[in-house]
Amino acid sequence: DAGITQSPRHKVTETGTPVTLRCHQTENHRYMYWYRQDPGHGLRLIHYSYGVKDTDKGEVSDGYSVSRSKTEDFLLTLESATSSQTSVYFCAISDSYGTRGYNEQFFGPGTRLTVL
Amino acid sequence: SQQGEEDPQALSIQEGENATMNCSYKTSINNLQWYRQNSGRGLVHLILIRSNEREKHSGRLRVTLDTSKKSSSLLITASRAADTASYFCAQPGTGTGNQFYFGTGTSLTVIP
């Protein structure tokens, strides 16, 4: 999985509790992303980062926050988890376009989160 | 939402047959990419086609692009049981984050 790890890989928590998911990369890529994957919805972008301390919202950012204090780490926080946030969460990375004129994304193994 | 759609949602074929899946996207692109996801794993990049290309091949994969219809198709020839996976198209966004917008995916089952 291209030097990307996610932790934890599985988590069960209760409604109202805070949860933090971690994504760690060893590729020194500039861009990092958090997606959630739900049946029938494919992958939906939650937040992304285009550099250390530079983050922005994706299409489903409500209820989530992120932080990136180092190039290699991108944290996703659910301040107060709800059952609707039960999902599989994927982290992805990509590098700048460079001379190829395009980039691609590399994905981590995913975190399965269940909110009871 | 800029999320594209894929058709069919699910496809089941016999080993050795060809599998075709289609993707429709919403905005202008400079390239379109296809990804594969094995069960329980993250997505893996398969192939990219640029906006000035109409067709591209990579091994048993053939991708076509029709920018006038904002659609693309992925053909897997002589399918194998190991091709069983979900397939997603992705279009790059235009923001500062090099973000991608993924389709809803096609679940392919190849029966041995």
Image (tube, helix red, strand yellow):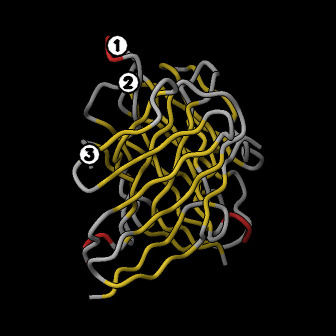
Q: Nearer the viewer, residue B55 or A34?
A: B55
Residue A3 drawn at (x, y percent): 25, 42
Query: From the viewer's perspective, is B94 left or right of B64?
Result: right
Query: From the viewer's perspective, is B44 left or right of B66?
Result: left
- Which amino acid type is shown beneath numbered disc 2? Asp
Q: Residues within 10 Å of mark 2 (few under 14, many from 20)?
A: some
Task: Have a look at marks 3 and 1 and say if they share a chain.
Answer: no
From the image, tell me which residue sits under label 3.
B58
Which callout, 1 or 2, points to the residue nearer the camera? 1
- Whether pointer 1 and pointer 2 mark residues with C-beta atoms closer than 8 Å, the reply is yes
Q: Secondary structure at mark 3?
A: strand
Question: Which label belongs to residue A112?
Answer: none
- Which amino acid type is shown beneath numbered disc 1? Gly
**Measured along the vertical axis of the image, is residue B27 above or below residue A99?**
below
Q: Secondary structure at mark 2?
A: loop
Residue beneath the point at 56% across and 31% down: B92
Residue A109 drawn at (x, y percent): 36, 57
Residue beneath the point at 72% across and 41% down: B2
Quote the CA–CA distance across marks 1 and 2: 8 Å
Residue A56 drawn at (x, y percent): 66, 28
From the image, tell me which residue sits under label 2.
A95
**Measured along the vertical axis of the image, is residue B96 above or below residue B111?**
above
Quote the CA–CA distance across marks 2 and 3: 23 Å
- Whether pointer 2 and pointer 3 mark residues with C-beta atoms closer than 8 Å, the reply is no
Query: From the viewer's perspective, is A104 left or right of B101?
Result: left
**Measured along the vertical axis of the image, is residue B71 above or below residue B5?**
above
Q: Quadrant of residue B25?
A: top right
Residue beneath the point at 29% across and 71% down: B79
Q: Residues within 10 Å of mark 3 (few under 14, many from 20)?
A: few
Question: Which residue occupies the extreme top position in the image?
Answer: A99
From the image, tell me which residue sits under label 1.
A98
